[in-house]
Amino acid sequence: MPSGETPPVGPGEFCYPAPRLQKGFNLPGDNLVEVSGLHFRRSGRPIFSGLDLAIRRGSITAIMGPSGTGKTTLLRMITGQLRPDAGSVRVAGLEVAGLPREALFDLRRRMGMLFQNSALLTDFNVFENVAFPVRENTRLPDALIRQLVLTKLHSVGLRGAAALMPAELSGGMARRVAMARAMVLDPELLLYDEPFSGLDPISLGVVLRLIRLNNDALGLTSIVVSHDVAEISAIADHCFVISEGRVIASGPPQELAASSSELVRQFMAGAADGPVPFHYPAPDYATELLGEWP
Amino acid sequence: MTLARELLDGFIAALRKLGAAVLFLVEILKQSPGALARPALISQQVRNSGVLSLIIIMTSAFFVGMVIGLQGYDSLSRLRQEDILGAGVALTLFKELGPVVTALLFAGRAGTSLASEIGLMRATDQLAAMEVMAIDPIRRIIAPRFLGAVISVPLLTAVFNAVGVLGAWFIGVQVMGVDNGAFWSQMQEYVDPPDIYEGVLKSFVFGTTAGLVAVFEGYNSPPTAEGVGMATTRTVVTTSILVLILDYTITAYLI
């Protein structure tokens, strides 16, 4: 059979990758995730105070903002791990907080999430980590699971590391394994929580390229929470900057860089001082130094 | 006034925790059929919790048996009744010491291991990752470990009893000179099936308690190093107290 030709699939045979059915994919105004009027408090402290945003299908959307503004919390609300105090989080038209358990699990099968610390299962090797969601969520035969896992590991460049344990991986490799695991069931929505933190420049470049490549090749919708403004600006189609519980700016990265808002400019330029002060609120420096020992 | 307030708050917190543990147990039981459908997961936990506890259980049982044999011989010989040593040892082990000491040792060896393992999985987001992968951690992680404990403790208790009797036999018959035939025949004469059933009932209750406390504390431990350490400590303390309270309650009910 000439290369590039699709092999015929007989009755009872498996065909992978399966054709993706994406209703309304990339249609104008078609949002996969919609957050509106979101309110959430933790330990009495307001995290969100009326947050509104929408994520377009097929796009890479960056969620940025100073530390502690609830970016990871937002991801956990999109996946249904946390429930809002008020407001709405809709994914694929479904109100996440209102879903019964089975429906929520069905929705989660359409998502993948890359955790900040990779969250690999420490007792399993790389292969079994990637195979884990397939084994638990499908009844595919082992031979097919093997092909599926090796395909995903190959796509992140770690097919040769399949037998390694998580403790033997570098931070960048662990992040790529977690990425393969998040993609293994071909999700529609992929969530990345600080995918670049702690990576060396080479690993960072690899992960950055993989996010863009996977999003375009697999027709995903990606949400990337990150502090790394320069890196994420290079691949994001759209950015939201969150501060004090609300979206204070949104738009393509180039637009945000030219924003008139001091806070947005400070954030995009990575300036140490500005509307977000360098110093945590404290008494007068000289008074405290020269004062009595408490 | 402050002390009364603190006692009241502590009592309310303990009640809340008890309620949360009961709800957690209900959730585990709901997910148990799914876990039972995958016996490999449970047998692996029986190995981790049970088989790996065998050395400590057998060593302890032998010495506990020897001590009971020695003390029993000393007491009975004053009454010239040393022939019933076998029966006394067996009743003490089967009804009380076997289930109780096994559960306490299990809490120290396997309960702490379960709590710290689950706590560490919580702290490193492994449980959260499973939830996002549409895999219920209660079904995949918690229920097999809980069921592993429920199965392991009665089996370990049986081993403890057998080795304990051997320890008492060694001291009583081989060292102190009690008649071998009298040792075994008196045991056969005085130990009835209800005595065995009592021990079996206790071992199941204690296994359920030890398993539940371990997985509950691990699952709800704060995701910090100190939090996991505290959960491990609470597992031993809570299991020990509950086992002793339940032991008295069951004994009082059955007598």
Image (cartoon, grey):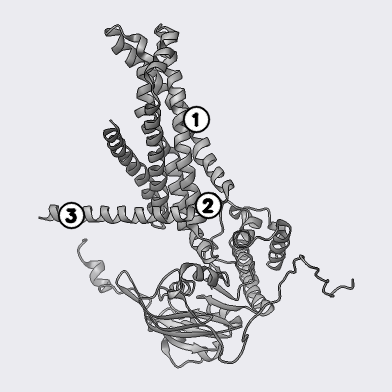
Q: CA distance from mark 3 to mark 2?
A: 39 Å
Q: Are marks 1 and 2 in contact (CB under 8 Å)?
A: no
Of pointers 3 and 2, the one earlier in the residue sequence = 3
Q: Is residue B104 above or below residue B136?
A: above
Left or right of A171? Residue B194 is left
Rounded to the nearest angstrom, the CA distance separating label 1 from label 2 is 28 Å
Q: Nearer the viewer, mark 1 or mark 2?
A: 2
Front position in the image: A278 or A89: A89
3 and 2 marks in contact (CB < 8 Å): no
Q: Looking at the image, is mark 1 or mark 2 earlier in the sequence?
A: 2
Q: Quadrant of the C terminus of chain A?
A: bottom left
Q: B61 and A194: which one is in front?
A: B61
Q: Identify the element where label 3 is drawn.
A: helix
Q: Are marks 3 and 1 on the same chain?
A: yes
Q: Left of B130 or right of it: where is A176? A: right
Q: Does residue B217 appear left or right of residue A189 in this picture?
A: left
- Residue A160, given in percent of the width and then of the height, sits at 72, 58
For residue B35, the mark is: 2
**SS at mark 2 in the image:** helix
Q: Chain of mark 3?
A: B
Which residue does the numbered mark 3 point to in the structure image? B8
Q: For this rendering, which residue is in front, A64 or A8?
A: A8
Please state which amino acid type lies under the numbered disc 3: Leu
Q: Which residue is mark 1?
A: B55
